[in-house]
């Protein structure tokens, strides 16, 4: 009599307990080499390589972002961005260019048809700008993996685009006062469409807490603009005043020539222009950095994932410093340093974000949202900002 072999069922792996997620940015070597190679190949290929360059930079930066010590993975490909670009080029850009050129050659630059085409194109850009933003975000999320699970956007790009267009109209008609409300509506729309696997993000909150900070920045900006106008009018009137003439005589002497006077006038005009640029490019953006920081913190507090609440430690000073350094990088590298600007923006967020609450990662399943075969074509055509 032979004993039967008894096989025991495999022991199932014990589920992991819910995790407290921590975020960190760990820089890797190679970004400088990547920047130089992308720049040189961009020149050789007359700019076509930029789709692969953008993909390589994203892959590098994504891999530096760690959640609980494990890096993100970017799975997008340059050919997908290139296909999206070709689609928009053939379907949208090329037909419009041909129609515009034909009207110009046949009827001249003053043709009413040409004006109509240009107006329709402008309306199209404004209406579909939000569509481009949504599709670009959707593509990036779908190519972002963590622990093998990818992200997704599950809503309608067209609905978001119409909301975006409506927000532009509301902001312009209200002299900007609708901005907190419309930004909150747009953020709620896109955040509630976001998924990590089959787990949803939730956004809920009011625009009211943003308005005191917004009002402060709005009135300070109005004061700055009034100051610019007063200075401009005063400088213009002063050019012909006796006091300015006396000042020129003091500098050039009683026998100042017409050329010297012209140099003096040009100098004052240049100083006025520099003051104008300084106020609009530095002073006013610094004022609005206070509101931007407030909005970032508020929107983070309004956002939850699996019941856990986000927090973002962003001050006005940190936003100003981020902007100034990025601007200097852009200027002194003539735009070649864009990868470093992208890295600084991602690191800014990752180093300051936290999630209060534990997440049951094991119960999250892979996203079933189909992957798009092409990426960001319209966003590239509109030159929509982003990584």
Image (cartoon, grey):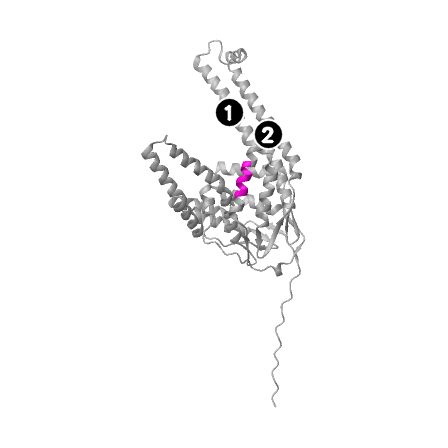
Residue 1 numbered mark, or none: none
**Mark toward the viewer: 2 or 1:** 2
- Residue 276: tell me if it is visible: yes
- Across the whole image, how many numbered discs are drawn on residues? 2
- Residue 25: tell me if it is visible: no
Q: Is residue 98 left or right of residue 270?
A: left
Q: Nearer the viewer, residue 215 or 50?
A: 215
- Neighbor class of circle 1 (other Cα within 10 Å; few <14, some 14-19, many 20+) is few
Residue at the location (33% across, 33% down)? 107
Location of residue 52 in the rendering, given as x and y in whole percent from the top left corner: 44, 49
Residue at the location (38% across, 45% down)? 44
Query: Which of the marked residues, 2 or 1, is nearer the chain's N terminus?
Result: 2
Give the vertical position of 258 relative to 66 (above or below).
above
Give how far apart the Cα atoms at labels 2 and 1 are: 18 Å
For label 2, the SS is: helix
Location of residue 342 in the rendering, given as x and y in whole percent from the top left corner: 52, 44
Identify the residue position indicated by label 2 in the image.
221
Q: Is residue 238 left or right of residue 82?
A: right
Location of residue 364 in the rendering, given as x and y in whole percent from the top left corner: 60, 59
Where residue 108 sits, quadrant-wise, is top left
Give the vertical position of 231 relative to 196 (above or below).
above
Q: Nearer the viewer, residue 106 or 258?
A: 106
Identify the residue position indicated by label 1 in the image.
273
**Residue 308 belongs to magenta span:** no
For the magenta stretch, what is the residue range? Answer: 162-169
């Amino acid at each position: 009599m032979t004993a039967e072999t008894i096989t025991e069922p495999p022991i199932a792996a014990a589920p992991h307990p819910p995790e407290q997620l921590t975020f960190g940015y760990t820089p890797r070597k190679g970004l400088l080499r990547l920047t130089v190679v992308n720049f040189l190949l961009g020149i050789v290929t007359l700019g076509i390589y930029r789709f692969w360059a953008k993909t390589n930079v994203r892959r590098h930066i994504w891999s530096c972002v760690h959640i609980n010590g494990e890096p993100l993975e970017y799975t997008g490909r340059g050919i997908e961005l290139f296909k999206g670009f070709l689609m928009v080029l053939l379907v949208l850009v090329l037909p419009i260019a041909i129609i515009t050129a034909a009207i110009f050659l046949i009827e001249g630059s003053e043709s009413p048809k040409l004006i109509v085409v240009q107006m329709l194109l402008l309306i199209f850009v404004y209406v579909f700008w939000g569509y481009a933003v949504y599709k670009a975000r959707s593509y990036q999320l779908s190519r972002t993996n963590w622990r093998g699970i990818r992200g997704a956007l599950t809503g309608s790009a067209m609905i978001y685009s119409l909301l975006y267009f409506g927000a532009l109209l509301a902001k312009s008609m209200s002299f900007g006062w609708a901005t907190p409300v419309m930004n909150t509506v747009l953020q709620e729309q896109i955040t509630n469409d976001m998924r990590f696997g089959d787990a949803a993000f939730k956004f809920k909150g009011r625009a009211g807490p943003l308005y005191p900070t917004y009002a402060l920045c709005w009135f300070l900006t109005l004061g700055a603009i009034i100051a610019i106008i007063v200075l401009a009018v005063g400088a213009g009137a002063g050019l012909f005043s006796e006091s300015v003439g006396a000042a020129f005589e003091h500098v050039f002497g009683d026998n100042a020539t017409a050329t010297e006077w012209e140099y003096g006038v040009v100098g004052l005009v240049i100083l006025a222009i520099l003051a104008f640029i300084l106020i609009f490019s530095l002073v006013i953006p610094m004022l609005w950095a206070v509101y931007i920081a407030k909005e970032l913190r508020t929107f983070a507090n309004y956002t939850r994932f699996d019941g856990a609440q986000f927090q973002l430690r962003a001050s006005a000073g940190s936003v100003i410093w981020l902007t100034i350094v990025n601007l200097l990088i852009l200027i002194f590298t003539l735009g070649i340093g864009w990868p470093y600007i992208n890295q600084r923006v991602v690191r800014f967020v990752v180093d300051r974000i936290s999630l209060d609450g534990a997440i049951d990662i094991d119960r999250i399943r892979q996203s079933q949202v189909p992957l798009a075969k092409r990426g960001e074509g319209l966003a590239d055509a509109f030159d929509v900002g982003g990584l």
